[in-house]
Each structure stands twice: as C-alpha cells, then as structure tokens.
Image (cartoon, rainbow, N blue to C red):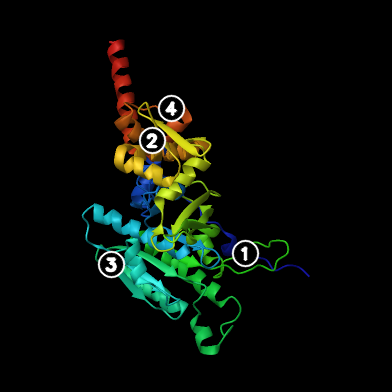
C-alpha cells in the first residue's frame, strides 16, 4: 500500500533572509544578541548563577571544602544516619549566616526553620550561639505545606529586600498530603519524590533570585540493590539534581574527656563530612569535624586534627611544632595550640589558615586558582609580597576568579602598548 503524500506546506522549512552584515565580528555579534535577547548576556558579566554572599564557618578546613563557606542562592543537602551531627552542622551554618550580616551592621536578615520532627531545642541553639530571636519556626505537617511556606516566605523576603536563610529538618520524617488523608502509599509509589521534584523546578529559580540559601536535612534508607548497596536519601532525585552540595555526614568515633571525678565521659563525636557532590569546590573530599554534645561545632579541635593529619605542622612523638616568623611554637594538643594563639601569638591562627588553604590548593590547580585571592591577600599583607606562583594557564583562569587581577592585567597590557608606541616613535 502506497504511503500518502505529505502536504507541501507541512514539510516546507522557513527560509531566513540573510540581511545582516556578513563581515560582522564575534564581539559585535555578541553585543547585538545581548541587546535583542533579554535572557542572553556575556559570561564575563556577573553571572546570575554567581553567589553574591558567602557565609564562612570560620574554620578553614570546612570553609575551603564548602568553597569559602555556605553560598547564597544555593541548595544543600546534609544526609546520613541518625545522631551523626547533621542538625548541629545546620545550626552552625545558620550561625555563620547571622554572624556575617551582623559583622556588616546589617539588620534585615532572618532564618526560616521548617521543623518536621518537633524537636527543635531553642535552649541548645542559643547555647551554640544562634540568635534565636531571628528564627521563624514552621511546624509543617505535610511536604506540600512546607514547600508552600518556603515559597511564600522567600517571595516576601525578595519583596522587602530581606536576607533569608532556610533549613528543613528533616525530609524523611514528613508525609505528603495524600499519605495524611489516605494512609501510606495513598498517593501511589514515590509520591514524595514526585512532589519534591515538581516543586524544586520552581523553587530553585526563586531561591537564586533572592540569594536565599536552603539546607535540606535528610536521613538515609538501606538499599536492597545487591549491585548498588550504597544507602540512599529519601525524596527521590529532585533534591539530588538541584543541590549544589550534598554532604554525607557519618560519625567516626566518640570524643572522650576526663571528668572532675576522674571518670572517662563521652563529650562529643568525631564526624566525617564526605562531599559526595560539590559544584563549588573539590568533590569527593573528606573533612572530619569535632562536634561537642552541648557546644556544637568545635573549630579548634577540627583545625588541630586537620593540621596533624595532613602534616601541615611537624610531628615528633607526642609534640607538634610550627615555625612562624622565625620562631618555633611547640604544643601537644589542641588546647596547647589554642593557648599559644590566644596568649602569645594571635597572628599564628591566620597563618595556619593560610597553610590549610595552600594545602587544598596543592591538591588541585583549579582549587588553587579559586583560592588565589585568599592566598595572595595574606601574602601581600603579612609576607611582603606574592610568593605563590601561577602558571600562565592558571593566571588566565585566576583573572576570571578575581577582578583585581583582571584590572592589573589590563593596566599592564595598556602600559605595554604605550611603551611600544613610544618606542616606535
């Protein structure tokens, strides 16, 4: 049987008349496109995907692993087994956000905490250092209500130019509306995953527009897949796809101290943060952090362990030492290091942070380029000039990462052109 002939009008391709200038260069082409197409702009301009603000933890090993700290407009997922430090790490991120704006004298900032487990401890949060007067609590009982709350608060923050930080603790413990009404699997298989995936497509744009950071705290489920036994976090792939950083948090060991009565007591945990996904710094990094059961994140012990493990300080038996300004400082533990910095040499802390950043930079040329502003700023201020060298390729990349270097390069090229012109005359 013969195939029916197609109508000529159906297969006709629209012809575009070539009326433009055939000799147009790429620069003119880019200018014309940017002018006529609203959604297109040069990559050398400030990107909408660039984070305007970065909230540091003030602990260099963790800050560098996060790409400087928590970035505004980004989505994070902290997941892992129960009682591993996920909620405490989230509180520390919120504290970093508050400290950042407080240090700038800014008053228009707030935190939205979506509480699904009804266990938020305001006393401990205050003890850790979080200004709880800045915290708004929403005890959403369904996923949909939580998402609506986030959307409405984010839109309100954008309208009023308010800096907002959001966390949701935890996704695993909250049902969908269909489950609440009809019972388990009331909405069918993977109902929560579908709801989250659909919501994230819209939410991502709103968060980026308002420079709003959000942390999803999640548990893990055991996988019965014999070919991929790795534990998975509930909620489907919606969070995984849209998150810039996913951190798997798992305890390594207990931290023990000697009490006043001479007995050994557990005072905290050593927890490993594994950056399974990281679009802001090196992925697949392990950063062990020390969490005190009451005080929260212990930045001193975390820094000390990183310095010793990565051999940034010299280790000889039970003693550790570091050379700073032609002087040797010896210590046996984190308390000894802390005492030296607080009582004898306050600038030693900044030097150790500088060494941590250089250690990360040594692992990866790309990280070295991204961190060069921190490295060279310290070297210019404390060491008399830029010591860390860059290859020509690294220097070209660094100019994209740090505008000051681009300005220096433009001035240098301009001076060369003037010298060449004067020489020719």
Of labels 4 and 1, the one closer to you: 1
Q: CA distance from mark 3 to mark 2?
A: 34 Å
Indicate which disc residue 134 carries: 3
N-terminal of the two: label 4 or label 3?
3
Residue at screen point 42% across, 38% down: 26
Indicate which disc residue 231 carries: 1
Residue 146 as seen in the image, left or right of residue 185: left
N-terminal of the two: label 3 or label 2?
3
Residue extending farthest to the front is 261
Q: Position of residue 321 (x, y in %)?
A: 44, 34
Residue extending farthest to the bottom is 182
Q: Secondary structure at mark 1?
A: loop
Q: Residues within 10 Å of mark 2 (few under 14, many from 20)?
A: many
N-terminal of the two: label 2 or label 1?
1
Quadrant that contains the C terminus: top left
Residue at screen point 24% across, 66% down: 160
Q: Are marks 3 and 2 in contact (CB under 8 Å)?
A: no
Q: Which residue is mark 2?
A: 375
Residue 86 as seen in the image, left or right of residue 378: right
Quadrant that contains the N terminus: bottom right
Q: CA distance from mark 2 to mark 4?
A: 11 Å
């Amino acid at each position: 049987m013969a195939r029916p002939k197609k109508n000529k009008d159906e297969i006709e391709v629209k012809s575009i008349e070539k009326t433009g200038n055939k000799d147009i260069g790429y620069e003119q082409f880019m200018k014309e496109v940017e002018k006529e197409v609203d959604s297109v702009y040069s990559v050398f301009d400030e990107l909408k995907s660039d984070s305007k603000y970065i909230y540091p933890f003030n602990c260099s090993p963790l800050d560098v692993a996060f790409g400087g700290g928590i970035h505004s407009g980004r989505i994070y997922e902290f997941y892992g087994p129960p009682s591993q430090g996920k909620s405490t790490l989230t509180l520390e991120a919120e504290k970093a956000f508050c400290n950042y704006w407080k240090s700038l004298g800014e008053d228009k900032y707030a935190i939205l905490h979506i509480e699904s487990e009804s266990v938020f401890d305001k006393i401990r949060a205050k003890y850790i250092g979080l200004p709880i007067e800045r915290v708004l609590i929403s005890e959403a009982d369904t996923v949909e209500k939580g998402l609506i709350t986030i959307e409405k608060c984010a839109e309100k923050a954008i309208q009023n130019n308010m800096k907002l930080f959001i966390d949701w603790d935890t996704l695993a413990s909250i049902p969908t509306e269909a489950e609440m009404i009809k019972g388990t699997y009331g909405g069918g298989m993977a109902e929560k995953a579908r709801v989250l995936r659909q919501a994230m497509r819209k939410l991502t744009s709103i968060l980026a527009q308002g420079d709003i950071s959000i942390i999803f705290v999640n548990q893990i489920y055991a996988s019965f897949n014999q070919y991929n036994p790795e534990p998975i976090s509930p909620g489907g792939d919606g969070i995984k796809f849209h998150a810039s950083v996913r951190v798997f948090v798992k305890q390594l060991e207990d931290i023990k101290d000697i009490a006043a009565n001479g007995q050994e007591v557990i005072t905290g945990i050593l927890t490993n943060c594994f950056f399974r996904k990281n679009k802001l710094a090196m992925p697949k990094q392990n950063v062990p952090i020390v969490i005190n059961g009451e005080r929260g994140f212990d930045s001193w012990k975390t820094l000390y362990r990183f310095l010793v493990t990565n051999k940034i300080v010299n280790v000889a038996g039970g003693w550790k030492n570091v050379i700073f300004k032609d002087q040797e400082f010896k210590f046996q533990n984190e308390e000894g290091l802390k005492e030296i910095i607080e009582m004898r040499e306050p600038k030693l802390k900044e030097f150790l942070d500088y060494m941590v950043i250089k250690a990360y930079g040594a692992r990866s040329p790309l990280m070295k380029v991204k961190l060069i502003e921190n490295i060279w700023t310290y070297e210019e201020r404390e060491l008399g000039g830029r010591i860390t060298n860059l290859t020509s390729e690294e220097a070209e990349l660094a100019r994209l990462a740090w505008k000051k270097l681009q300005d220096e390069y433009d001035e240098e090229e301009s001076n060369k052109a003037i010298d060449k012109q004067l020489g020719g005359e």
